[in-house]
Amino acid sequence: MITLHNVTKSYGKFKVLSNCTTSIAKGEVVVVCGPSGSGKSTLIKTVNGLEPIDSGEIIVSGIRVSDPGTNLPMLRSKVGMVFQHFELFPHLTIIQNLVLAQVKVLKRSKSVAEKTGMALLDRVGLVAHAAKFPGQLSGGQQQRVAIARALAMDPIAMLFDEPTSALDPEMINEVLDVMVELAREGMTMMVVTHEMGFARKVANRVIFMDRGEIVEDAEKEDFFGTPRSERAQHFLSKIL
Ligand code: ADP
Ligand code: MG
């Protein structure tokens, strides 16, 4: 579903990604972890073309992401992304947030888009909030709306960049629960997170990054059991 081959990227002289190679099969859940500044956000943003790369290749469902001819808005609708800060449109109601891209990008009629939107709000437990504005919801609720909004595009894969890092502790689980359910339904997911409980529960693999490199790319059991590199051992000893 997703293949990265020797992906390299620099900001000036600073190499933010160095020969990153991995692949994610359909239905797989891969957790990406590593110290702050190691390139995790940059890596997952390359997958839907939000960050251009200098060299290497990224193929998502047969589409070469860095080909000049690639329709990036369409690709981004098919590879949903959820950020640390929910990034809902503040001046639109919750249901309008869910409808907008369905109508603009997928050309759905407003009534079909609303129906899809309400079904997804139901799924994340927020139907009662459809007519509210994002500012009237808690952080955890806004993040669930952001997930529902991405799902409204019928994505083939979902990318998450520290989706619970900006949340108060009591709201983390309501967001993780939605993600766990999504994973169990077979969604292909790449998740940057420090929530190792989530990783243990649903990840198939764990990628550990340090200084722009993929240092480990291991089955979950192997990663938590016996991380091969000293850097991963050190990282785990600090966060577990
Ligand atoms: P992580 O998500 O693991 O914390 P990032 O991918 O956000 O790491 O960033 C990796 C490194 O690249 C950091 O050192 C960061 O300062 C640097 N960086 C990120 N974006 C830019 C940018 N637009 N220009 C210059 N440096 C950047
Ligand atoms: Mg980051």
Image: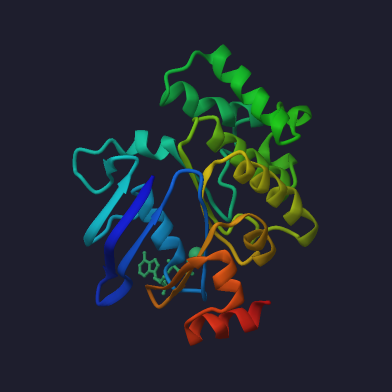
In this rendering, would 122 be left or right of 170? left
Please state which of residues 155 and 139 is positioned toward the viewer in this rendering.
155
Q: Image quarter for residue 88?
A: top right
In this rendering, would 6 be left or right of 109? left
Q: Check the picture and name the quadrant holding the C terminus.
A: bottom right
Q: Position of residue 211 (x, y in %)?
A: 40, 78
Give the residue displayed 61% in from the left and 67% down from the top: 194
Task: State the scheme by which the image is colored.
Answer: rainbow
Q: Is residue 52 above or below residue 80?
A: below
Numbered label tally: 0
Q: Position of residue 172 (x, y in %)?
A: 73, 56
Please state which of residues 12 and 187 is positioned toward the viewer in this rendering.
187
Give the residue displayed 48% in from the left and 67% down from the top: 218
Q: Is residue 205 above or below residue 208?
A: above
Q: Position of residue 2 (x, y in %)?
A: 37, 49
- The answer, for residue 50, to whether it is visible in the render is no
Query: Ligand 1 quadrant?
Result: bottom left
- The answer, for residue 4, to whether it is visible in the render is yes
Q: Is residue 234 above or below residue 139?
A: below
Q: Position of residue 1 (x, y in %)?
A: 39, 44
Give the residue displayed 50% in from the left and 13% down from the top: 109
Give the residue displayed 61% in from the left and 36% down from the top: 148
